[in-house]
Structures are given as C-alpha cells and as structure tokens.
Amino acid sequence: MSKYLVRRLLILIPVLAGISLVLFTILALAPGDPFEELATNPNVPPEVRANLRTQFGLDDPIPVRYVRWFTSMMKGDWGFSFVSRVDVATLILQRLPTTLLVVGSAQLLGLLIALPIGVYSACRPYSLVDQIATTLAFIGFSLPSFFTGLLFILLFSIYLDWLPFIYRADISGTGLPWLWAHVKQAIMPVGVLALLQGASMTRFMRSAVLDVIRLDYVNTARAKGLAERIIIVKHVVRNALIPVVTLIALQIPGIFAGALITEQIFRVPGIGSLLISSILANDTPVIMAITFVFSCLVVVFNLVADLVYGWLDPRISYR
Amino acid sequence: MAGSIPASRTASSAPEARAAGAASAASRTGDSLRAETWRRFRRHQLAIVGAIALAVMVLAVLAGPFVYRVPIDQIDFKAKLKSPSWAHPLGTDDLGQDVLARMLYGGRITLAVGVAAMLIAISLGTAVGAVSGYMGGTVDHALMRVTDLFLSLPGLPLLLLIIYLFRDSLKKVLGPEIGTFALIVVVIGGLRWMPVARLVRAQFLSLREKEFVEAARGLGAPPLRQIVRHILPNSVGPVIVAGTLDVAAAIIAESSLSFLGLGFPPDIPTWGRILFDAKDNLDFAPHWAIFPGTAIFLAVLSINYIGDGLRDALDPRKVL
C-alpha cells in the first residue's frame, strides 16, 4: 500500500506542473498589462516604468517567467492582493477551512443518502420505491444548484422562517447555542450540495449494484447460506463501490463548481466567494491563486479516490 | 439481433406489426437503422415527454417574440415587481419590464449557447479521440495525457478566470453581444470535450481492427477516408448521447456564469441572468426568480431524459 501511495504521489508532480502550465499560458496570453495604469499616468516617467518592468522580470522570456512563477507558487509565495494588501496565502488559508467543511460534509451527507437508497433500489429493481427513487434522483441532478439554493431560501427562510440565509463566520457565544447556530446556518448550503451529489451518486450506486448483484459469486454466497444483509454489505456493496468511486472522482471538479455557487448564494466566506469578489475587484493575484488552489484540491481529492480504490480492490494496489 | 427482440406490447397495431416483421430483414438497409432507433426510443416514455417539452420550449423561444409582442426593455415603474396578471402573464421585474417577454428572448440565447457549446465540445472531442484511437502509439499516449490533464482542471473556476481575463478585449473586437457569446461558447465547449474524446477513442480502438475497416484498407482507402466513411459513422452512437447530455451541462454552465453576474450583460436577459437580477428580491417578488429557474430546470431535465432514451435506443446490446 505504501508503495502504491508513493507512486500516486509521484504522479501528482507532472499533473500539477501541467495544470500550472495551462494556468500560466492563459495568464500570459491574456491581453492587458499589470502596469497599464502606470502607462496612462502622466506623472510616471517611462524610465521608471521600464525599471519596474525589469525589476519584476516582465521583460524576460516566457519560459523563464513560467519557471520563476511555478517555483514561487510551490514555495508558498503567492504575492499580495491588490485590493486588501494582504498576503494572498494568508487570505486563502483563512477561507479554505470553511469551503472544505461545507464540501466535505455535503459529500458525506450525499453518500449517506445515496448509498442505502441506491442499494435498496437495485435490490428491488422496478418496484415502486425504485421508481420513485430513480425519478427523484433524475430530478435532483437536473436541478441546477443555484436554483435549488434560491428555492431553499424561499421555502426555509422566507416562508417558514426556520433558517438564516446568510452565513456568518463571526457568531458570538459559546457552547451548545454557538454550535447550534453554526449547524443551523450550514444546513442550507450543505443541503444544496448534498442533494446534487446524492442524486448522481444514487444513480451510480443503483446501476453498479445492478451489475454486480447477478454475478455468480453472489449466488454462491447465497447458496452457502449467508444472511442477505451480509451478502449485500460485504459482497455486493464492496464490489459495486469500485466503479462508483471512479465516477465520483470524475465528478470532483463539479463539486467545487457547485461549492462556488452555493458559497455565493448563501454568502459563505469560503474561497469560492473570495474568487467571485476578487474577479469583481480585478484582483488578479488572488484570482490566479484561487484557481490554482481549486486545481490542487481536485488533484488531491482524486488522489484520495485512488487510495479508496486501492483499499476497495487490493488487486489494484499490488499491481 | 432481430431474434432477441421480444414482441412489443402494441404489436397488434398494423404499422407496429409491419415494423416488427420488417425488423428481421431490416438491419441491412440504411433507413431501417434509424427506424429501429426510433422504435426503441419511443419505448422510453419519459424521453418522449422530454422531447415534447423541449420542442415546445424551442418553439416558444423561436416563435414567441413574434406572437407575444411586448418589448423586453419597456420600463414602467408603475408596474414594477407585479405578480403574474393578464397584462403580464409572468409578472414584472424591478423596472417594470415584462418577465415573459424577457424569458422568451433570453431563452434563445440560453438554448443557443447550449447547442453551440455542445457542437464545439463534440467536434473537438471527436477529432482528438479519432486521431488518438486511429494513430495509437506515442500520439495516442500524448493526447490521452492531455485529456487526463483537462479532466483534472476545475471547470467553473477556470471558466471564470478565462472570462475575467479575456472579456474586455473580446468585447472590443466583436461587440458586447457576439463577443460574450463567442467567449462563453468557446470556453464551455473547450472545457467539455474530454469525455467525448475518450468515448471516440475507445470506439476507434476496437473498430479499426474490424474486418470491414481492414477491407477498406485493403481496397486502398486512405486513412482520412477510412476514418470519415467507415469508422466514424459506426462510433456515432455514444457521441450522440454524450452530445445530448453536453447541451444540458452547457446550459447549466452558462446559467451559472450569468447567475454569478459574470456571463451576459443585463440587456441580454438569459435565464441565468434573470435569476441573478431576481435573487435579491426573493422575499417580495418570488415569481421573478421561479419562472426562469423552472425554465432552466425543465430544459435540463428534458434534455437529460432525451439523453437517457437515446442511450437505451442506441445501445445495441440492450434488449428492449
């Protein structure tokens, strides 16, 4: 297993280099110049501007600039925000835990909903419960997250007045009331994401279990007198999860897209809403860094999926 | 294959019986494959419902503005934020503009973005997949690494980054409408070709070794002709399904962008853009958000059901 982990970690390096190359190419191709304002300002003499350009290395050839940019990215030197004059890394580290908490709990909740429903549907295909579940799953993953979010706000905040629709990081108080306030404000953002994730996972789970449940080894398990529960949990689900993990891994970029939108709707102070506000404020260093962080998150979660894969199917990690 | 088709439930009706009878001799002529697909597609009732719903929507946005002649930008502060009424069937927004008229107009853009982005995604994906699968070797390896790289890029953040960096200069060159449209379509399509490339590559890998391709090769068909005339038509099924689902994904992507306020400008009221404008007035004008949101949802749901039906209809292994 550790050899497998090391191999997976080594694969990360070219992937991250490739992603950074794509990001840097986009930035380098983009029109506009960080010193544009200085060029139009008559108070700044051209020599000063030229000096600044050399100082920041803007006149160097593009490969040199890329290598320098990549090494400083890796060292954690991400520059300063144009707007808030804060270190970009500090800014992102403040926001990152919130995003991870929301995405993580949504994923967990989605899995908790999808697993039993998917398995139950597949065990009784075309039954009434299955048909209801399949239809709901179809609706769930066709509902765009921004619309679900608005519907949730309309129902739970405006008509029922149960939940706050603005997420606050600075809730005062201690103990249980404080915890409850946090849980309460997280219900809707997490719920929106969990609905989206749970719906597609239910579909994956159902079809994966349907593929497995007719195989001979399941019949064997039944023939030797195992309890149905053990057959399902130990024999069917474990094998059905292997393709499901692949599909979930392929969906990871989608999860972060959904997180970005939910953060924006509920004003969750995560990196997604930071990205939007930075775009509106033309804060290029922060935008680049957040896009890079999102890429890293996708890659890291893919790594986690690979490890789960190796755990579910030991044949993969021994290869 | 004909032998594995069970008698259909409505086999007693005359055309159906003829179709079932013809099915055994059918698989040779070109037309019958389409008829067979249509017969299988019709079995999926929800796909039919989806197709009808989508057709109604397309018809509404195409013909609607000619029938319903209320201007989209007529500002009327006396009628602002009104609930649906006879004068304004879907209510009005905060400037007193008619929501129905805006939705009919904006729906054109929303659906056009979906279709155009899908076309870009499947052309790019088919090209990459075809080259990769036909050439094999180093080219295949390199192209598949690129595909994997693109698959691990975070779609929406990257979309936002590209639009942020290129928006203004493209607007200057092409004008605000066409510039935004071209940018959004190209970027959405350019970030969604990977699944198609993989599907096409997999099809090519198996098809290029088949006897009929070998025969074409033996008769001296150049590679381009082998690909275009012989392999590609046989690998089109999964591409059609993926393309259908891509339309839905592209509609969601465009609506997300517009919903974040970074897509189309306010004078081009795509459904996502209307939602963006409506979201701060949810408490006193919920209709303003509910109608465009439902339109996006229904379009995506119908397209997904159509894709589901097509998947059943085009998968020859699936017995219906």
Image (cartoon, coloured by chain):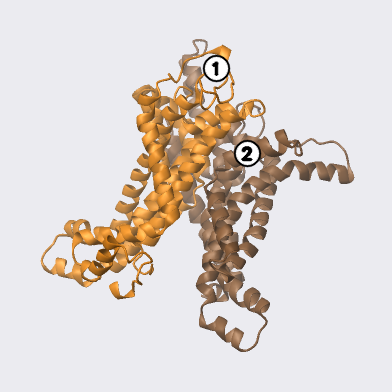
Chain colours: A brown, B orange
Nearest the eye: B33 or B87? B87
Residue B180 image point, x, y percent: 41, 29
Q: Residues within 10 Å of mark 1 (few under 14, many from 20)?
A: some
Q: Is residue B57 above or below residue B152?
A: above
The subunit carrying tag 2 is A
User: In the rendered image, is residue B244 in sight?
Assistant: yes
Residue B313, image quadrant = bottom left
In the image, what residue type sits under mark 2?
Answer: Leu
In the image, what residue type sits under mark 1?
Answer: Leu
Marker count (numbered): 2
Left or right: B263 in relation to B310: right
Residue at x 36% of width, y 36% of height: B59
Q: Is residue A188 above or below residue B183?
A: below
| Dot 2: element | helix
Q: Which residue is mark 2?
A: A151
User: In the rendered image, is residue A57 in sight?
Assistant: no
Does label 2 lie on the same chain as label 1?
no
Q: Is residue A255 above or below residue A158?
A: below
The subunit carrying tag 1 is B
Q: Which residue is mark 1?
A: B95
Question: Which quarter shows the C terminus of chain B?
Answer: bottom left
Residue B228, image quadrant = bottom left
Left or right: A170 in relation to B19: right
Report how far apart the C-alphas of labels 1 and 2 lie in the structure. 23 Å
| Dot 1: element | loop
Q: Is residue B78 above or below residue B161?
A: above
